[in-house]
Amino acid sequence: MWLGPAKWRPYSDQLAPRGVNHFYPMFWRFDDDFGTGYNGDWGAHHLDIAQWGLNMDKSGPVKVIRSDEPYSKDLFHGGRRQFGMKFLFANGVELYHGPFNVWGTVFYGTDGIVAVNRGKIAVWTGTGPVKPNAEIRKQVEGVTFMKDKILAESVGKDYGTDATVKKDNRLDSVLKKLKAHFNLDKAPEKLYYSENQVKNFIDCVETREAPISSAETGARSAILCQLCNMSYIYDTGFDWDPVKNDFANGTGKGISLKRDFCRNGWEVIV
């Protein structure tokens, strides 16, 4: 089959590496040799926020629970499940990995709900403990769940990676309302404040202070992503030791935690 004349390019351009993503956009994530599934990308954002909100940046889950959601029919996914697995933490908190929607992370507390994403937030108070199911998650996504209990909400535009670039003032007004309602200026514990992580990192290179996302925090987030993906790859659950960063209680058999062919004989000893 003739596809027409080849487009001429300079020889130097022909030699330049173009990358797997150029030929297989997005698909590289699902190559088990060097990818970690969808969550290897998005999980680094949203699983990270979940772990931060749970104050677990220096620890991790103790159990990974296999998904019982339907297998994906998308050929890119290799027939694997893409959501539904759960993490169980030592404090009894359960983290459910759900499909893409408006919210990146949703916290269900004993008396309220906080849903967040870049440029978006919604806060419910006085709901009592809520055990989310598919219908409740759908209502939270559409901000229709217990509308009389919504303290404030802003499902505005995604500000991207720089929170200082404001595309509207709606989020600002909602954050001011929440700050006043919960009297956050007098909160006993102050969180690390940063409007731009790139600038924060550069500033910390100069000051030698720890950035908002330290190497350990990044590693803990990456571990969550990889544990999530392994559960889907092997379609199983297992126990996990967040101190040793290894399988626990004799589980995880047949699952490798490293890719020997990538190391070329090298070992990392900490």
Image (cartoon, rainbow, N blue to C red):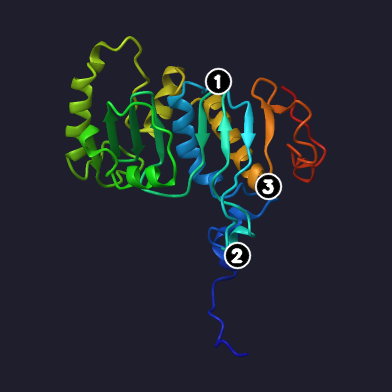
* Location of residue 176 (image quadrant): top left
Disc 3 to disc 2, C-alpha distance: 17 Å
**Dot 3, how many residues are within 10 Å of its Cα: few (below 14), some (14-19), or many (20+)?**
some
Q: Work out whether 142 lies above or below 257.
A: below
**Of residues 151 and 103, which is closer to you in this image?**
151
Q: From this viewpoint, is residue 18 visible?
A: no
- Name which residue type carries label 2: Leu
**Of residues 185 and 252, which is closer to you in this image?**
252
Residue for point 38% across, 42% down: 136
Disc with the residue nearer the chain's start (3 vs 2): 2
Q: Work out whether 75 lies above or below 185.
A: below
View extreme (bottom): residue: 2
- Label of residue 75 in the image: 2
Residue for point 64% across, 23% down: 242
Disc 1 to disc 3, C-alpha distance: 27 Å
Q: Which residue is mark 3?
A: 235
Q: Position of residue 199 (x, y in %)?
A: 37, 31
Q: Which residue is mark 1?
A: 58
Q: Work out whether 20 lies above or below 234.
A: below
Q: Position of residue 64 (x, y in %)?
A: 63, 34
* Location of residue 27 (image quadrant): bottom right
| In this view, the mark in front (1 or 2) | 2
Residue for point 60% across, 68% down: 14
| In this view, the mark in front (3 or 2) | 3
Residue for point 21% across, 45% down: 167
- Name which residue type carries label 3: Asp
- Name which residue type carries label 1: Lys
Task: Describe the element under mark 2 as helix, strand or loop.
Answer: helix
Task: Describe the element under mark 1 as helix, strand or loop.
Answer: loop
Task: Describe the element under mark 3 as helix, strand or loop.
Answer: loop
